[in-house]
Image (cartoon, grey):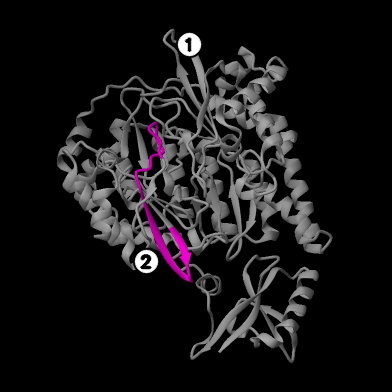
Amino acid sequence: MTLQVYSASLLKEGLVAYLCIDEDGISWSTDLNKATAVDENSIDSLKAEAERSEKENIVVGAYAVEVTQTANGLEPVENRERIRAYGPTISLPQSGSGLSGQHAA
Amino acid sequence: MYQYSQADHQLLQERVSQFRDQVQRRLNGDLSEEEFKHQRLRNGLYLQLHAYMLRVAVPYGLLSSNQMRTLAHIARKYDRGYGHFSTRQNIQYNWPKLEDVPQILDDLAKVEMHAIQTSGNCIRNTTSDPLAGVARDEIEDPRPYCELIRQWSTFHPEFNFLPRKFKIAVSGATHDRAAVAVHDIGVRLVKNDAGKLGLEIYVGGGLGRTPMIGKLINPFLDPHDMLTYLEAILRVYNRLGRRDNMYKARIKITVHETGEDKFRELVEEEWSQIKDNGLRLRDEDIENIKAHFKDPEYETLSDFDADYDAAILSDPEFAHWADKNVELHKKDGYRVVYLSLKSRNQPAGDVTANQMDAIADLADKYSLGAIRSTHRQNLVLSDVKLKDLHRLWKELKSLDLATPNYNHLTDLISCPGMDYCALATARSIPIAQALTERFDSYDYLNDLGDISLNISGCINACGHHHVANIGILGVNKKGVEVYQLTLGGSAREDASIGKIIGPAFTADEIVDAVSKVLDVYLENREDETETFLTTYRRLGQAPFKERLYG
């Protein structure tokens, strides 16, 4: 079943974050699995909270993201959103690397 | 290289203070995102797929070792330990925090660097030949003209809100290593039969969704008139350029819709009004800037070195590298060295902080403290003594910066693609890495010879796929990344736009498709000296299409 979460970028850090609503209140987490997922009929409540967070200068550019519930947790439907959620699909250069020369032809 | 004046330093410091205040006001909530966005973009700060991205200008690709160390410091302290050299010879950081950016700009200002006009609808960093000042085929050093353009265009009040971004490239050599034909304005320094210097002015080149080759609108402009003429072009563009449709707002569309002759006429008309104003360059204006680009104190050296020759004979790996990544220098006994940022281990153009520091040390040790970045996402040490090449190679090899592939298949341009970019519709780095892995054979690359392969992750074409001999464009088709193949492009003096060969390939198919294209070339070339591009232009698409689609 397709669900929706709200995502945005954290204003200070720029990192991808997801809206979490629980008994402790409203927060934004960089972990998709902590996001509050709702069906299409309930998305307006998330939208209102996300817009409030934008006005309070916590996040930037909030929008709804389609996800599915899998055995491993929430997973975005679109490839772009999967990359946003999990990070670049390639290994990031490591400052300790590039020094071995193992592959230098 | 150009040394900042007191006024330059003051200007940068004022800009840093201004932006520090703007960031603080944004964080306090005094500025909305809509208000702040325009300010951050003016300072090279984007909000990308995963984080903020800061683009730092490297004016016409020149860096001192000290500046490189500062870039390493920024990568290490404020980012994730690496940076990415772009096709505008700039460097980008992918993970800075907003609150750190003012301090990053402050650190940059201390070494005469900044991020001004690396974004937004203004005149961007002027690019040039990475061999400027040292090339054997040089007609005139383009760097002073680049610097004059930089000074003219920086904070130019009239051109701060152009219809769209504006890119200028300047080349001063017989061979075009700056892709001038695909810039909004391309400038080529030439000499006439009498030996007099002039400028060829090309307008309306560009890539993106409507690739076009620039039109020669002035075949021999007096260099003293360069800025007034550029000002006239910009004024016409600023007046006629479309602001109703961002996809039709670049000057290439203006020139196309206006017509080349009419556009030229409008520029000449505008120019006639301003050609004798204070912007006209005097001899002393040009000479004052040229003084910043005087030759260093080169030693008088022989162009033969017995130890070098012995190393070439005894060490085939070194010989391969010297054959591919080393070029002649205008001075005997010196060589130009390409540091390949295209190894199997890192995305094209990426450099770690440790590598940056090491490159700075090598520049000091072997190359008069200077480094250049290239529009093909490599680095250059421009003044290396022939007798030092073997020692330098050993050090570069240990840094994974000695892949012998300059201007060969795996020396590919790749944009960051959907792994980083908010605009991208497909990933490009994984495809680049798969191609690099597949064709990681010196003998095969050597057999293929001079060839270019570029990859873009969307139609905006930051990976310059249109002007590659083999171009790959990643697009999203019903939620799946697919890759279109274009053949026959060139960014050099014989510039051309590649043509799409047929239906796109999936990510799993595209490497095999490239392999088939290469097979057709190898089977059909007249001899080993006929390049891929020449073969393609001789044969046309048919045999390639036949092999790819049967």
- Name the residue rendered at 63%, 56% in the picture: B46
Q: From the image, state whether disc 1 or disc 2 is nearer to you.
A: 2
Give the quadrant of the N terminus of chain B: top right
Dot 1 falls on a residue whose secondary structure is loop
Total number of numbered discs in the rendering: 2
The residue type indicated by label 2 comes to Thr
Numbered badge on residue B506: 2
- Name the residue rendered at 47%, 48% in the picture: B357
Residue B486 visible somewhere in the drawing: yes
Q: Which sits in the foreground, B534 or B359? A: B534
The percent coordinates of residue A1 (x first, y second) are: 55, 89
- Name the residue rendered at 45%, 47% in the picture: B464
Q: Which residue is mark 1?
A: B196
> How packed is label 2: few (under 14 Cα within 10 Å), some, or many (20 or more)?
some
Q: Chain of mark 1?
A: B
The percent coordinates of residue B293 (x first, y second) are: 52, 24
Give the quadrant of the C terminus of chain B: bottom left
Dot 2 falls on a residue whose secondary structure is strand
> How packed is label 1: few (under 14 Cα within 10 Å), some, or many (20 or more)?
few
- Name the residue rendered at 46%, 38% in the picture: B371
Region rendered in magenta: B474-496
The residue type indicated by label 1 comes to Lys
Q: Chain of mark 2?
A: B
The percent coordinates of residue B285 (x first, y second) are: 63, 17
In the image, is B250 to the left or to the right of B340?
right
